[in-house]
Image: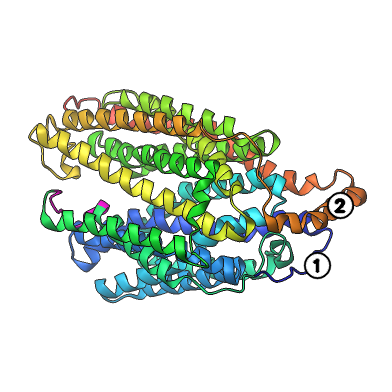
């Protein structure tokens, strides 16, 4: 049963960029936090006098909680309001960040990170639905593209902000700075996100929450992600590993059985009968398994193999996020104007080219070779990710945008975790086969170990190329039709037409002004910064080569 939606002001969509501002800021804050934590792990381990393996639980606990709760929280957002859940999530995230900075022991720090992760699950589960609902249906690509651009900017800033902070302040300062940022984002969300516009795409559902589906999915995903991460280094043939894998299968079967019989399922499995939804989900998981290779291996090549400083390496790696930011903005607008499928196909073609390009990398190639591959891979990620998510979300009814967006993010997370586990196993096996079972920080000073790493690097990127080809193949099966209207959208179509007519009659073509004013300066800034960054990195690489010109062993 659905309640009637409130009357919507004719000029509501004219403020779409104002509504998107807090959504983009929350995306930036969330990604900034994730990337900063990776940089801070060594400092946290040193402060609490623990091993790097133990400190990795600072990241693992977040991955587990996010994966377990993101889909149930998406359903909660569908039922009780995306904006409300989003704001509560931001407040919990800020509380968790404050608690993390104040934690006197490592176990309390893990507890504080758990609070942050619960808040992060509430944020991530509603971000996509809020972004799409803040824009007219015909500008869905622009909404998703802008969302991906905010992610890319957060990814660019994270390593730089963390590196600069750790040079002058303790690691706790990074978490403390997230507190006012979270509060500011929550306040701006309460003020600027227009509830009347959200009512066009969301109706309050008077029904029970699917506790059975939520528990089964959370357990299945938690065990699966733990199994993939394998934090205690279980042998794949051990009884515990096999038992855990069997548990995942049983839980997933029970989940499917439960959802197909639930009167109000958390995840309506019948959505997979829609070809666009099914193929987009498959391509998304495969695509992120391939793309995560570029996130994982180049930092090791630059820092551990080539001996480059983390500061210079950070500037090089930013090129990947820069390419993603440029492509996301373009792909979103092009998908709105034409059709998302051709651009998703184009993105996967670029991904194939960039991963093959990467496979030729080694320790002695000039830095510009790797920089070009990183930039191309970022462009590929932006071009396939945005249209892919557009196809996925476009196949959903409006009442399911929350859980659909959460499932989209869950697919991304599982794809990333799986890809990282597989790629790590390939590289470790290649090095062990050559007799090198050493820490990463010893590669640069151990003759022959660099060559062993490069062998694993090549195998990993060959696999990534094959995965990218599989993603392209699956994407080709999607239909080229535009987004089908859901029942709730049909109900409000007359209101939307009145809004459009009213805006056009009052302002002529002025409605485009917010779009251009909101995005063009950002796009110009990104494009103008690219040659400056290229020159800066080339100059730093020249200095590095002069300093290490006498080094010949890799």
Q: Is residue 50 left or right of residue 299?
A: left
Query: Is 318 in front, or is 126?
Result: 126
The N terminus: image quadrant: bottom right
Q: Quadrant of residue 339?
A: top right
Q: Which residue is mark 1?
A: 7
Tag 1 or tag 2, which sits nearer the N-term? 1
Q: Position of residue 382 (x, y in %)?
A: 52, 38
| Number of numbered labels in the structure image | 2
Q: Position of residue 14 (x, y in %)?
A: 78, 54
**Would residue 249 be seen by someone viewing this image from the given angle?**
yes
Q: Position of residue 5 (x, y in %)?
A: 74, 68
Q: Quadrant of residue 479?
A: top right
Q: Secondary structure at mark 1?
A: loop
Is 169 a magenta residue?
Answer: no
**Would residue 542 be seen by someone viewing this image from the given angle?**
no
Is 234 a magenta residue?
Answer: yes
Query: Is 313 in front, or is 92?
Result: 92
Q: Which residue is mark 2?
A: 503
Query: Compared to 57, does 157 lie above or below?
Result: above
Magenta residues (range): 228-236
Q: Is residue 538 left or right of residue 243?
A: right
């Amino acid at each position: 049963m659905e309640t009637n939606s409130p009357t919507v002001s004719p000029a509501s969509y004219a403020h779409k960029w104002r509504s998107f501002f807090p959504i983009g800021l929350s995306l930036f804050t969330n990604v900034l936090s994730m990337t900063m934590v990776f940089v801070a792990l060594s400092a946290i381990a040193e402060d609490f006098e623990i091993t790097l393996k133990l400190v990795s639980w600072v990241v693992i606990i977040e991955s587990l909680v996010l994966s377990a709760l993101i889909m149930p929280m998406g359903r909660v957002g569908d039922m009780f309001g995306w904006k409300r859940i989003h704001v509560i999530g931001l407040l919990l995230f800020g509380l968790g960040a404050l608690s993390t900075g104040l934690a006197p022991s490592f176990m309390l720090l893990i507890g504080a990170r758990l609070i942050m992760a619960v808040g992060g699950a509430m944020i991530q589960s509603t971000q996509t639905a809020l972004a799409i609902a803040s824009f007219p249906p015909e500008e869905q690509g622009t909404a998703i593209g802008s969302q991906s651009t905010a992610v890319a900017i957060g990814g660019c800033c994270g390593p730089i902000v963390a590196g600069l902070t750790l040079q002058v302040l303790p690691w706790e300062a990074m978490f403390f700075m997230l507190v006012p940022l979270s509060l500011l984002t929550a306040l701006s969300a309460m003020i600027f996100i227009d509830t009347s516009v959200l009512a066009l795409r969301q109706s309050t559902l008077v029904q029970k929450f699917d506790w059975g589906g939520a528990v089964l999915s959370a357990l299945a995903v938690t065990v699966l992600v733990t199994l993939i991460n394998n934090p205690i280094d279980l042998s794949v043939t051990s009884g515990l590993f096999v038992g855990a894998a069997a548990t995942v299968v049983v839980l997933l079967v029970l989940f499917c059985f439960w959802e197909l019989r639930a009167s109000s399922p958390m995840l309506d499995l019948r959505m997979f009968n829609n070809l666009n939804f099914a193929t987009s989900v498959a391509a998304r998981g495969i695509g992120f398994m391939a793309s995560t290779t570029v996130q994982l291996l180049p930092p090791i090549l630059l820092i551990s193999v080539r001996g480059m400083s983390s500061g210079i390496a950070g500037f090089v790696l930013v090129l990947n996020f820069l390419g993603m930011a440029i492509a996301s903005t373009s792909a979103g607008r092009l998908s709105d104007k034409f059709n998302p499928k051709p651009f998703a196909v184009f993105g996967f073609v670029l991904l194939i080219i960039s991963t093959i390009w990467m496979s030729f990398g080694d320790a002695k190639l000039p830095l510009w070779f790797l920089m070009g591959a990183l930039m191309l891979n970022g462009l590929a990620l932006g071009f396939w990710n945005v249209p892919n998510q557009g196809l996925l979300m476009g196949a959903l009814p409006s009442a399911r945008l929350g859980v659909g967006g959460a499932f989209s993010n869950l697919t991304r997370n599982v794809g990333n975790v799986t890809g990282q586990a597989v790629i790590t196993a390939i590289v470790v096996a290649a090095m062990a086969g050559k007799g090198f079972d050493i820490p990463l920080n010893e590669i640069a000073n151990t003759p022959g170990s660099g060559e062993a790493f490069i062998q694993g690097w090549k195998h990993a990127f060959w696999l990534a190329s094959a995965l990218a080809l599989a993603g392209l193949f699956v994407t080709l099966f999607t239909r080229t039709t535009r987004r089908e209207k859901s029942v709730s959208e049909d109900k409000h179509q007359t209101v939307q037409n009145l809004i459009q007519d009213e805006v056009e009659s009052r302002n002529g073509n002025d409605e485009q002004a917010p779009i251009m004013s909101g995005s063009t300066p950002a796009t110009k800034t990104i494009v103008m910064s690219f040659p400056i960054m290229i020159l800066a990195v080339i100059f730093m690489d020249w200095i590095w080569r002069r300093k290490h010109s006498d080094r010949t062993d890799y």
